[in-house]
Amino acid sequence: MTLRKKNSLSPTFKKILSGLGQCLIGVIIYYAISSYQQRHLITTGTLAPSFHLPQLQQTRWFDSKELAEKTSIIYFFAPWCQVCKLSASNLNTLDNQKLNVIMIALDYQHTEEVSQFVEKLDLSMPILLGNNTLKQQFNISAYPTYYVLDKEQRIIGHSMGYSTELGLKLRSLQ
């Protein structure tokens, strides 16, 4: 007959603890990498740079002043970006009655590239044609990058990389 120590853990419980520990380490590493990647983005609480840009396939220009009065998501993308192709359609699911959602194309050679990207994903929000000046003003270094603005156009959130529909909705509630 073997005696078990009072403080010994069962093998199953040890496996569960080990798995939880590995998950915790993974989450910490993920947030550390995300924070490092986003270190150059504009700080929350800062007023977003204003802009005046042409809209894709329209003669009308879009002015950032049009974003006032609602929370806004500005999503920067490049038409060649594979992660953008995976995440951009999540923007279509956001409530346009409560949010302004715009996409700004950067790092494209021809507007046809942007048009094909938009048509393939059946995007319904305004698509603007950005430039290197705007890219520098918003400190864009990777795609996709997006900013969440409050009604006064102050940055209340930002992120880089893929974001789920739920992630976008939660960030826009800030």
Image: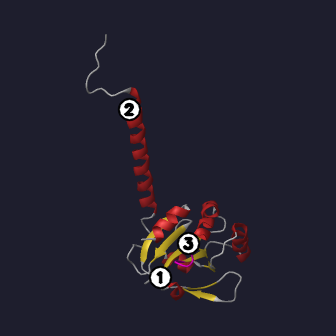
Q: Nearer the viewer, mark 3 or mark 2?
A: 2
Q: Position of residue 5 (x, y in %)?
A: 26, 22
1 or 3: tag closer to the N-terminus:
1
**Quadrant position of the C terminus in the picture:** bottom left
According to the picture, the residue beneath numbered tag 3 turns out to be 75
Q: Is residue 139 visible to us here?
A: no
According to the picture, the residue beneath numbered tag 2 turns out to be 13
Q: Is residue 7 above or below residue 102?
A: above
Report helix, strand or loop for mark 2.
Answer: helix
- Three-letter residue code for mark 2: Phe
Q: Main secondary structure of the magenta part?
A: loop
- Three-letter residue code for mark 3: Tyr
Q: Is residue 142 visible to us here?
A: yes
Report helix, strand or loop for mark 3.
Answer: strand
According to the picture, the residue beneath numbered tag 1 turns out to be 49
Neighbour tally class for label 2: few under 14, some 14-19, many 20 plus, Cα within 10 Å: few
Q: Is residue 5 above or below residue 150?
A: above
Q: Position of residue 159 (x, y in %)?
A: 48, 66
Rounded to the nearest angstrom, the CA distance separating label 3 from label 2 is: 44 Å
1 or 2: tag closer to the N-terminus:
2
Q: Is residue 51 above or below residue 12?
A: below
Range of the magenta residues?
94-99
